[in-house]
């Protein structure tokens, strides 16, 4: 398989994983893929290598509320978005801006 074909195959797999709603471990078990291999390709396709340019990711703003938030320390809030993803921000952050970001990330 050529390098281009392999990249195209992994783009489809990574997209399928991201749309599945499954954890990495659960998706990999179903697909017969090692978690480390999925992680490698996710990083590589995002342009995570040294000296690479990060791609912009579109955000769609909706009216759904954020999942949960807690005080993470002096002047900091932490918002758990699920799936091991957490957003930390200064407690003085503009609330309307933060709400827009959170709606977009959901």
Image (cartoon, rainbow, N blue to C red):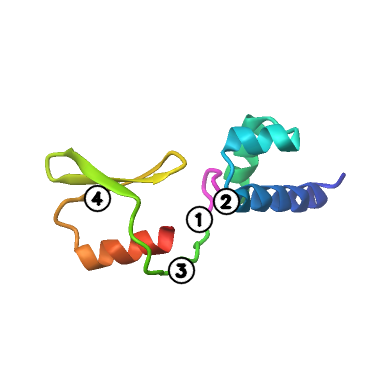
Q: Secondary structure at mark 3?
A: loop
**Residue assigned mark 2:** 46
Q: Kindly give the residue lying farthest to the right in the view shown.
A: 1
Residue located 38% across and 63% down the image: 64
First reached walking from the N terminus: tag 1 or tag 2: 2
Residue at 75% x, 33% y: name it: 32
Quadrant in the picture for the N terminus = top right
Q: Please give the range of residues in magenta.
A: 46-54
| Placement of 36 over or under 19, stated as above or below | above
Q: Is the stretch drawn in magenta largely helix, strand or loop?
A: loop
Residue 102 placement, left or right of 90: right
Label 2: state its secondary structure. Answer: loop
Residue 68 drawn above or below residue 56: above
Image quadrant of residue 25?
top right
Residue underneath mark 4: 89
- Residue 21 in the image: above or below residue 34: below
Ranked by sequence position, the earlier of labels 3 and 1 is 1
The disc, 4 or 2, on the residue closer to the chain's N-terminal end is 2
| Residue 78 falls left or right of residue 38 | left
Give the alpha-carbon distance from disc 4 to disc 3, as whole Å. Answer: 20 Å
Q: Residues within 10 Å of mark 2 (few under 14, many from 20)?
A: some
Residue positioned 49% across, 62% down in the render = 56
Label 3 neighbour load within 10 Å: few <14, some 14-19, many 20+: few
Q: Give the label, 2 or 3, closer to the camera.
A: 3
Tag 4 secondary structure = strand
| Residue indicated by mark 1 | 54
Proximity of marks 1 and 2: CB atoms separated by less than 8 Å: yes
Residue bearing mark 3: 60
- 3D distance between C-alphas at marks 1 and 2: 7 Å
Return the disc, 2 or 3, that comes first in the chain's sequence: 2
How crowded pointer 4 is (Cα within 10 Å; few <14, some 14-19, many 20+) is rated as some
């Amino acid at each position: 398989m050529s390098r281009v074909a392999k990249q195209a195959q992994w783009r489809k797999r990574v997209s399928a994983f991201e749309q599945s709603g499954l954890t990495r471990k659960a998706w990999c078990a179903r697909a017969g893929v090692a978690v480390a291999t999925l992680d490698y390709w996710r990083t590589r396709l995002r342009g995570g290598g040294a000296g690479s340019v990060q791609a912009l990711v579109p955000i769609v703003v909706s009216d759904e509320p954020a999942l949960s938030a807690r005080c993470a320390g002096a002047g900091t809030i932490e918002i758990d978005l699920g799936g091991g993803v957490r957003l930390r921000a200064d407690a003085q952050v503009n609330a309307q801006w933060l709400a827009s970001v959170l709606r977009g990330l959901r």
